[in-house]
Every structure is written in C-alpha cells, then in structure tokens.
Image (spheres, rainbow, N blue to C red):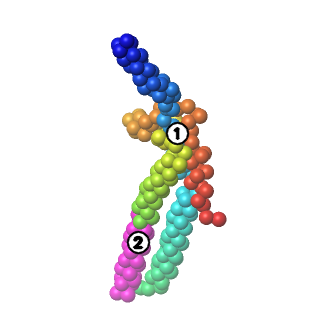
Amino acid sequence: MKRVLAFALAVAVGVASAQPVLSQQTPEPPKIGFLNVRRVFQEYWKRQSIEDSLKARSTALDARAKEGKARLQSMAEALATLNKDSDEYRAKVREIELARFEMELGQKEEANRIERDARRQEALLYKDIVRECQAFGESRGYASIQMFAPIDENFERIQDLDVVIATRATLWRDDRLDVTQQVLDFLNAGKPR
C-alpha cells in the first residue's frame, strides 16, 4: 500500500511539474527588419540641410574665385600700360603671379576643406541614423535592423565585384520585413518646423 501510495504521489508530482512545461507556447522568432540605407540617406531631412550648407560654401567659394579673377584681370590691364622693359613692369608681373598663386592655393585649400567636411558630415549622419535605428528597433521590439542595398540598375557595368559583394551582406529579404519607410517616418518626425 505504501508503494502504491508513493507511486501515485510520484506520478502526481510528475504530472504537476510537467504541466507548466507543456503549457508553454513556442517562443516567437526574433523580429528582424531590413533598411535601405541609400534611401534613408537620400530622404533624411538632415541630409538636405547638410547639402544646403555645403552648397552655400561652394557657391561662396565660386564667388570669391570670380572676384579674384576680376582682380587679376584689372591688374593685367594695368600692366598693359607699363613699359615692358621697366622695373615697375617686372614688379607688377611678379605681383600678378603671386596673387594668382595665392588665389589658386586658397581655392584648393577651401575646396579640400569643403570635401573633408562633407565626408565628416556624412559619417556623423550615418552615426545618427544608426543611433535612431537602435531607438526605433528597441521601441518596437526588434532584435535586429539590418542594412539592405538593392542591386544597382547598372549592375552589369560594375567593374569590381568584390566591392559589390562586400557591401551587400544581405542578398535577399522578404519585402514584408522592410522597415525603411517606418524608420524614415521616425527620423523625419524630429524635423524642425
């Protein structure tokens, strides 16, 4: 009798302990989203702001270049009135050459600064996009948001296949997992009015 009672008790404990395990549902697979980074770069409001700033600097550089050329032209016209054999003529030629050199050097330096700033701004923008994607993903329960770059229309013309392969870690994804528009809405919600 004790054995039967012990056996019944063991079966009852086994069934009771198995009940929570059996009642658990299969866990949900992790939520993954894919993002077209090219599109986000093109449509993020901060990108346009950066481009406008860089364009204004380039326009100002062009305007200074035109002013410099006009100044050089007027110096050259003044040179035409001088005797070619005079010391004053030779001094004016040196002055014009020095002014031309300084102007061209200044233009190259400023163009290089603008180019460096453009690359730095792009890197900061990418960092901002990554940070915002993390906030978006965490707030909506995503385990991961991965980059997806569609195949370029001119794919046949691409010379370096290694670069294409290296930049396309995801070869295919289901369109239902595309969160590009949702992330863009999230990013552009912070646009100042």
Q: Which residue bears the numbered disc 2?
A: 106
**In the rendered view, would you say 82 is above or below 98?**
below
Q: Are marks 2 and 1 in contact (CB under 8 Å)?
A: no
Q: Main secondary structure of the magenta part?
A: helix
Start-end of magenta stretch: 84-112
Task: Quote the CA–CA distance across marks 2 and 1.
Answer: 47 Å
Query: Residue beneath label 1, please?
Result: 33
Of mark 2 and mark 1, the one earlier in the sequence is 1
The crowding category of the residue bearing disc 2, from other C-alpha atoms within 10 Å (few below 14, some 14 to 19, many at least 20), is some
From the top left corner, tell me how far across and down residue 61 is, in percent: 50, 70
Q: Quick one: 168 or 68, which is closer to the camera?
A: 168
Q: Nearer the viewer, residue 84 or 43?
A: 43
Q: Nearer the viewer, residue 109 or 57?
A: 57
Q: Identify the image quadrant of the N terminus.
A: top left
Residue type at mark 1: give it: Gly
Are there few (<14), some (14-19), or many (20+) residues within 10 Å of tag 1? many
User: Which residue is painted at 48% across and 75% down in the image?
Assistant: 68
Query: In the figure, is residue 136 to the left or right of 3?
Result: right
Q: Is residue 160 above or below residue 51?
A: above
